Image (cartoon, coloured by chain):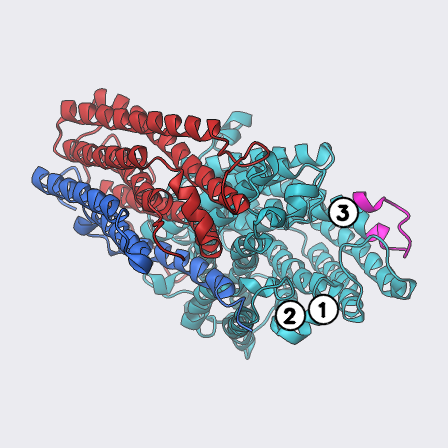
Chain colours: A red, B cyan, C blue
């Protein structure tokens, strides 16, 4: 063989968090961040399927969507939006704490983030219970007084599917923030190695962002004009 | 890297470094995971093949005499779902890609070895759900799950089938994610993008589709499950839902999924054609760009599956036009393979025979695809055997040919042993003959009007159906042969040195089989891809 | 790569910035809630989605740190995700939007 591969040496002080198959911490960090972003675009496409369905049906049945939207609880929806924005702030500050090595602040901020997440889920549970009792869960149990109940049901199907998958993501988020909080408490993360905190943060912000769109699309459809 | 040809058994390599079931089931070595995938998908290949044989046996006679109509529906559904989601989609990426990509780019492993193992377990879980579906009666919706039949009427295991594919889909997503990050971040020094083997480019393009398309399938199947379990009615026309929306979402994934199945095959063929023509691949840059172009354009054409379903005529015109565009990069690939062979010193080893098969059959499958992209012709042949023949020419004639060819090409690297060349050539010939005898008559049948998915047919179609069934029998023999001699060669095959084909590429510069971390030292690449002009060694005739 | 332990020089964003972004997000939430109560006719959906996109942009750029990221690849990845979602939506609507044309 005429080609002969030369040797690369790494004059690296070994970081215990460096996995064997990476040459440097920088490479590991870049791979991990990129992996997270690629994962997030799969999430965009996952929710994107439902947003497409929403767009098509809203285009077809605008009045029914207005009627359905009026059954949403404006205040719970708004409060939940505020809760999630606050949780995103504490999450961002948590990542910052890990970058500058403030272990205590990191743990506290992660726990606050989890608590905000739990508040969100609690409010969502209250809303779900209300909709269930009002026969606003699609299927045989569904009942709607007013014109075009069939298409209002489509609105509610999408509402349950979209917020349901969002809530599932929240639940997963709360759990992994908890795991990260535990390891932070054990002192696993610091300025040298905070990638897992950062990635969980990215996930959390993404889930928040999905809600930023769900809020106006589900709760705030204008009832003042014809589509 | 002058390794003296020590017998494989004496060198430490990824196979003999550890023994025992635990060392396999908990491995994070991409090469071992590739072999785990090989076992899993071979199992499903034979399950899917079993259903295919039953289908062909039923169609031996015009009357529905072997199985009931309902059973027949289940047979073709399970055949499709098993073959597509548990064989074709994981085949080349998860087996050959997993094994080769890190070695080809000079890395020690994929970027996320544990996620790689997790992907395999997801496919196992999906596979178990699929087996559960099959053993409890199977689904009968066709592999496409079209509502409202799937959501409101089918009395079969639709939800578990959907769940199986949902889980298998996440396996596919994570494999794609792993490949994308690996190719971006793990390349050895000097391994620039323009030096990547086309096999790596092909898997990169495939990964883009897996990552961007599969989640849409996942959510669509979830919506079908919600419709079925809780009567959500999102796709139920009786309640204002639009079944065509399902078709849009489904084909948004499932048309590009065809390219998940064919692009890696194109990668294999590029490696093989270049090696056995002893020439640099013609138009390397265009070949790489064409792969990416197919991946992107593949997302713009999905509604050509819906021309007669009632979509807007104007949308149909746009999708018809866009569908033709995919032919351009596909044709570039065929031309460039041919141009690579032109004036090359071609040797007819088994992998090259499969590559020839691929190029010819893919061209036929692709050109008949143009018939189907044309609105007028499509109306005539929609849901006939013409469509069946067309996509089997792509998937079986293209993908499976490339997969088996690739297995032969890299078998010395994977196992450290040579397969028996004469048997290899014989099997390649049998598969080629069997394949064409099975599927060429189906073009004619479809054009004459025989519809797909029926267990009975008019007596005038019998001659062609008998030919097709005879071909399927030959094809089955052709598929069993390599399995037998591959297993045989693991013990009795000639020991392979590190580069039995005299091929270019990093994977041929490490031992066969490679050590656990692929290279003893991280290689530094200073040469272009397919640098056959500067390779001194003469290929050894096996 | 800097530092002897091979760690990336992380851009630590000042607390002030995060809090300013948070306040802006809160204000935008109030605005979008309030605007939904006003009759804006046809443009109300556009206004709501514009505000939502503005909020999403703030989250992506600051909270998710894309503004400070050195890797251009991240931006390519994000743009690809949005672009593919646009393909799905636009080409689906190409069907629904033109079905009633005769």
Residue drawn at x 68%, y 74% is B377
CB under 8 Å between discs 1 and 2: yes
Q: Is residue A134 above or below residue A24?
A: above
- Residue A160 spot, x, y in % from top left: 46, 37
Instruction: Give the Cα separation between the discs numbered 1 and 2.
Output: 8 Å
Q: Which residues are magenta?
A: B56-71
Q: Which residue is mark 3?
A: B73
Residue B65 within the magenta-colored segment of the rendering: yes
| Residue placed most toward the observer, B254 or B99 | B254
Judged from the image, the secondary structure of the residue bearing numbered disc 1 is helix
CB under 8 Å between discs 1 and 3: no
Residue B456 within the magenta-colored segment of the rendering: no
Residue drawn at x 29%, y 26% is A119
- Residue A175 spot, x, y in % from top left: 35, 26
Q: Which residue is mark 1?
A: B381
Mark positioned earlier in the residue sequence (1 or 3): 3
Instruction: Give the Cα separation between the discs numbered 1 and 3.
Output: 20 Å
- Residue A29 spot, x, y in % from top left: 26, 42
Q: Which residue is mark 2?
A: B372
Report how many numbered discs are placed on residues in the image.
3
Residue B535 visible, this angle = no
- Residue A158 spot, x, y in % from top left: 47, 43
| Residue placed most toward the observer, A169 or A189 | A169
């Amino acid at each position: 063989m005429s080609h002969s591969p030369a040797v690369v040496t790494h004059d690296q002080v070994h970081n215990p968090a460096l996995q064997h198959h990476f040459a440097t911490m920088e490479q590991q960090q870049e791979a991990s961040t990129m992996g997270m972003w690629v994962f997030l675009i799969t999430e965009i496409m996952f929710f994107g399927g439902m947003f497409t369905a929403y767009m098509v049906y809203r285009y077809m049945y605008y009045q029914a969507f207005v009627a359905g939207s009026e059954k949403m609880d404006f205040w719970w929806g708004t409060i939940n939006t505020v809760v999630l924005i606050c949780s995103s702030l504490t999450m961002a500050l948590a990542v910052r704490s890990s970058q500058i090595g403030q272990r205590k602040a990191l743990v506290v901020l992660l726990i606050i983030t989890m608590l905000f997440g739990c508040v969100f889920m609690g409010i969502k549970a209250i809303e779900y219970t209300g909709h269930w009792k009002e026969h606003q869960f699609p299927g045989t149990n569904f009942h709607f007084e007013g014109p075009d109940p069939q298409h209002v049901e489509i609105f509610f199907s999408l509402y349950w599917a979209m917020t349901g998958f969002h809530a599932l993501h929240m639940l997963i988020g709360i759990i992994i923030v908890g795991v990260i909080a535990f390891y932070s408490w054990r002192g696993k993360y610091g300025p040298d190695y905070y990638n897992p905190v950062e990635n969980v943060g990215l996930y959390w912000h993404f889930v928040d962002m999905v809600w930023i769109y769900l809020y106006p699309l589900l709760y705030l459809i204008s009832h003042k004009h014809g589509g | 890297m002058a390794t003296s040809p020590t017998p494989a058994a004496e060198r430490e390599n990824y196979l003999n470094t550890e023994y025992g079931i635990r060392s396999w089931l908990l491995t994070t070595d991409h090469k071992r995971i590739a072999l785990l995938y090989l076992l899993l998908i071979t199992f499903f290949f034979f399950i899917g093949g079993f259903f295919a044989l039953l289908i062909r046996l039923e169609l031996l006679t015009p009357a529905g005499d072997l199985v009931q109509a309902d059973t027949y529906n289940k047979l073709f559904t399970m055949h499709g779902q098993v073959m597509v989601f548990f064989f074709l989609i994981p085949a080349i990426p998860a087996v050959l890609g997993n094994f080769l990509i890190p070695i080809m780019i000079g890395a020690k492993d994929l970027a996320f070895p544990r996620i790689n193992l997790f992907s395999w377990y997801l496919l196992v879980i999906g596979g178990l759900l699929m087996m559960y579906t099959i053993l409890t009666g199977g689904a009968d919706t066709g592999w496409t799950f079209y509502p409202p039949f799937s959501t409101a009427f089918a009395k079969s295991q639709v939800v578990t089938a959907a769940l199986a594919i949902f889980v298998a889909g996440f396996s596919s997503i994570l494999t794609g994610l792993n490949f994308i990050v690996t190719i971006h971040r793990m390349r050895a020094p000097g391994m620039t993008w323009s030096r990547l083997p086309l096999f790596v480019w092909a898997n990169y393009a495939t990964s883009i589709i897996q990552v961007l398309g599969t989640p849409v399938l996942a959510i669509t199947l979830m919506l079908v499950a919600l419709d079925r379990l809780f009567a959500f009615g999102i796709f139920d026309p009786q309640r204002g839902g639009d079944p065509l929306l399902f078709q849009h979402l489904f084909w948004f994934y499932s048309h590009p999924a065809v390219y998940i199945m064919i692009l890696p095959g194109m990668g294999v063929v590029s490696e093989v054609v270049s090696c056995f023509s002893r020439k640099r691949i013609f138009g390397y840059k265009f070949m790489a760009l064409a792969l990416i172009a197919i991946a992107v354009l593949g997302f713009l054409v999905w509604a050509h599956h819906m021309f007669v379903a009632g979509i807007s005529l104007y949308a149909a015109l746009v999708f018809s036009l866009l569908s033709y565009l995919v032919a351009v990069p596909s044709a570039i690939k065929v031309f460039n393979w041919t141009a690579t062979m032109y004036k090359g010193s071609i040797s007819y080893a088994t992998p090259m025979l499969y590559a020839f098969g691929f190029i010819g059959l893919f061209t036929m499958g692709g050109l008949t695809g143009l018939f189907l992209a044309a609105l007028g012709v499509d109306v005539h042949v929609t849901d006939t055997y013409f469509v069946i023949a067309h996509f089997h020419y792509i998937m079986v004639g293209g993908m499976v040919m490339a997969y088996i060819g690739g297995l032969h090409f890299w078998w010395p690297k994977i196992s450290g042993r040579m397969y028996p060349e004469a048997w290899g050539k014989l099997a390649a010939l049998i598969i080629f003959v069997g394949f064409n005898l099975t599927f060429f008559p189906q073009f004619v049948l479809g054009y004459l009007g025989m519809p797909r998915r029926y267990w009975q047919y008019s007596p005038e179609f019998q001659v062609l159906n008998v030919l097709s069934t005879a071909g399927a029998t030959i094809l089955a023999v052709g598929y069993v042969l390599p399995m037998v001699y591959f297993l045989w060669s693991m013990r009795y095959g000639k020991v392979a040195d590190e580069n039995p084909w005299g091929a270019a590429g990093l994977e041929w510069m490490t031992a066969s089989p490679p050590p656990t971390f692929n290279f003893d030292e991280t290689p530094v690449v200073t040469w272009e891809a397919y640098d056959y002009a500067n390779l001194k060694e003469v290929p050894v005739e096996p | 790569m800097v530092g002897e332990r091979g760690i990336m020089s992380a851009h630590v964003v000042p607390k002030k910035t995060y809090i300013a972004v948070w306040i802006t997000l809160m204000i935008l939430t109030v605005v979008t809630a309030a605007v939904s109560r006003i009759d804006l006719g046809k443009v109300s959906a556009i206004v709501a989605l514009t505000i939502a996109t503005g909020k999403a942009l703030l989250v992506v750029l600051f909270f998710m740190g894309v503004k400070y990221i050195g890797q251009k690849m991240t931006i390519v990845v994000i743009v690809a995700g949005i672009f593919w979602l646009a393909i799905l939506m636009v080409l689906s609507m190409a069907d629904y939007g033109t079905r009633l044309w005769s």
